[in-house]
Amino acid sequence: MRRLLQAAVLLVICTIASAAGHGAAISVSAAGDIMTGSSYPTPLLPERCTDLFAGLREQLGRADVTFGNLEGVITENTSEVKPCKEGCFFFAMPPSTPQCLKESGFDVVSIANNHAGDFGAAGRRDTARYLAQHGLPYSGQDDCRPAILERKGLKIGVLAFSPSAGTCPMNDHAGATRRIAELAGQVDITVVSMHAGAEGMKALTLPPGREFFLGQDRGDVRAFAKLAVDAGADLVLGHGPHVPRAMQLYKGRLIAYSLGNFATWQRFNLREANGYALLLNAELDREGRFVQGEIISAIQTKQSGPTLDPEHKAARLVQELSDRDIPGHGLLIAPDGKLRPAAGPDYGSRSGGQKKL
């Protein structure tokens, strides 16, 4: 009888410990494209950079790690401007930009995107130099170096990809698989960023296969996102289309195919869904599995940064797109943006991507 009682007590303890292990351990907030004003071809800058983020300042400071895509170059040297025939955009942000982002709540940024080379190799070097000087971690240049942060006793690795020259190459699937798996073996939580896909209102739909825009191969975002999870990614954050896209749960990991624009001063098209700014909050357990989250909806105009949207347009759009483009996406997306797995956390196994021991 005593042995039976001891066994029962041990079973209860193990069950409680297991349940605790499936609770949230780390929170990540993620925003899409950020461009804080450009000095080229003529200066067009806000009076104070931090004003762009004032409307969501409280929300930006909540998570353990806050991520954004820095869409452009940090430089004062515009002599190596990229060749352009017509209709081109160039983004040269001031050297104070990293400090502005830190003060606004950002902890890490991607610099892998189609505007990273607006001012050539010198612009890429300046961007990395200013971010390092201000102590803002980044990933995405062609050395494919990840950013690694520590929170709550966990190591969080961030690795950013895009199909554009001078960035970590997204369309090299074999190389991407290897790099993600290597990072997953070194850290506890692996976050992969992808700047990919076509652009604008026509890009709301998540198509099968590769996407092309202005003659450039913008990648197969569905294939890449799943490849990343199979290799060891715990959270995949897409941006680039400038509009929100569908989300899904894949092998227990959250994939956001596009976070849209977030804070893009003056020079971006912000009509219709181009002006829907969302901040994704994702809570993960210690194994990186998605527990719950929220899509915080905001609206931005050319005269302001994002401000909270009481109608939750971005969240409602993501819900609609997810249901339409990915039947069985595995998420419950409430009209107010609350997110959770459709039938409890999906603890399914995945191939590849060994976690750090």
Image (cartoon, rainbow, N blue to C red):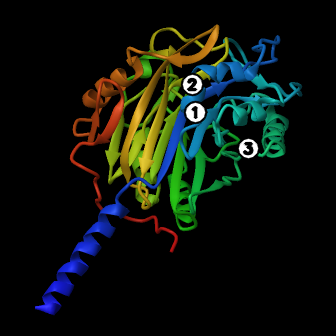
**Contact, mark 3 vs mark 2 (Cβ under 8 Å):** no
Disc 3/disc 2 C-alpha distance (Å): 20 Å
Side of 194 relative to 76 (left or right): left
Q: Earlier in the sequence, mark 3 or mark 2?
A: 2
The residue located at (71%, 53%) in the rendering is: 143
Q: Earlier in the sequence, mark 3 or mark 1?
A: 1
Circle 3 is placed at which residue position?
Answer: 136
Neighbour tally class for label 3: few under 14, some 14-19, many 20 plus, Cα within 10 Å: some
Disc 1/disc 2 C-alpha distance (Å): 6 Å
Circle 1 is placed at which residue position?
Answer: 60
Q: Quadrant of residue 31?
A: top right
| Residue 118: % across, % down | 75, 28
Query: Which amino acid type is marked by label 3?
Result: Leu
Circle 2 is placed at which residue position?
Answer: 56
Q: Is residue 152 above or below residue 198?
A: below
The residue located at (56%, 18%) in the rendering is: 306
State the quadrant of the N terminus: bottom left
Q: Secondary structure at mark 2?
A: helix
Q: Secondary structure at mark 3?
A: loop
| Residue 245: % across, % down | 41, 28
**Contact, mark 1 vs mark 2 (Cβ under 8 Å):** yes
| Residue 307: % across, % down | 54, 17
Neighbour tally class for label 1: few under 14, some 14-19, many 20 plus, Cα within 10 Å: many
Query: Which amino acid type is marked by label 2?
Result: Leu
